[in-house]
Amino acid sequence: MADQQLDAKGLNCPLPILRAKKAIKSMDTGATLEVEATDPGAIKDFAAFCRVTGNELLESSEEDGGIYRFLIKKSG
């Protein structure tokens, strides 16, 4: 289970990324953030976000009902 959860369902780009960035900023290194989103663009957005910020995308999946789930580990 993630250390923190973020519900970004119903939000369009760039709001899921901006909210995740804000949440990660307040977390300790090594902590995990689980994000749920409904924007199909979030798949590419979160991959790019983690690549640019150095955080680790541990999991990216699509669940029934068009919900995308991302598990991000905060790095350094």
Image (tube, helix red, strand yellow):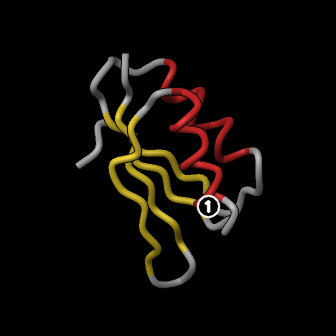
Please say if 66 is above or below 57.
below
Residue 43: quarter of image: bottom right
Image height of 41 relative to 48, above or below: below
Disc 1 residue crowd, few under 14, some 14–19, many 20+, Cα 10 Å: some
Q: Residue at x 63, y 37 (%)?
A: 19
Residue 66's x, y, as percent?
Answer: 57, 79
Q: Quadrant of residue 4?
A: top left
29 or 19, which is in the foreground? 29
User: Most extreme residue toward the front, as rendered?
Assistant: 51
Q: What amino acid type is highlighted by mark number 1?
A: Lys
Report which residue position mark 1 lands on. 9
Label 1 element class: loop
Residue placed most toward the observer, 9 or 63: 63
Left or right of residue 74: residue 50: right
At 50% across and 46% down in the image, what residue appears?
6
Q: In the visual, does 6 lie left or right of 45?
A: left
Q: Position of residue 52 (x, y in %)?
A: 58, 31
Return the x and y of residue 73 as percentages of the image width and height.
Answer: 35, 35
x and y percentages locating residue 14 in the rendered image? 76, 45
Which quadrant holds the C terminus?
Answer: top left
| Relative side of 29 to 55, left or right | left
Q: Residue at x 44, y 54 (%)?
A: 70
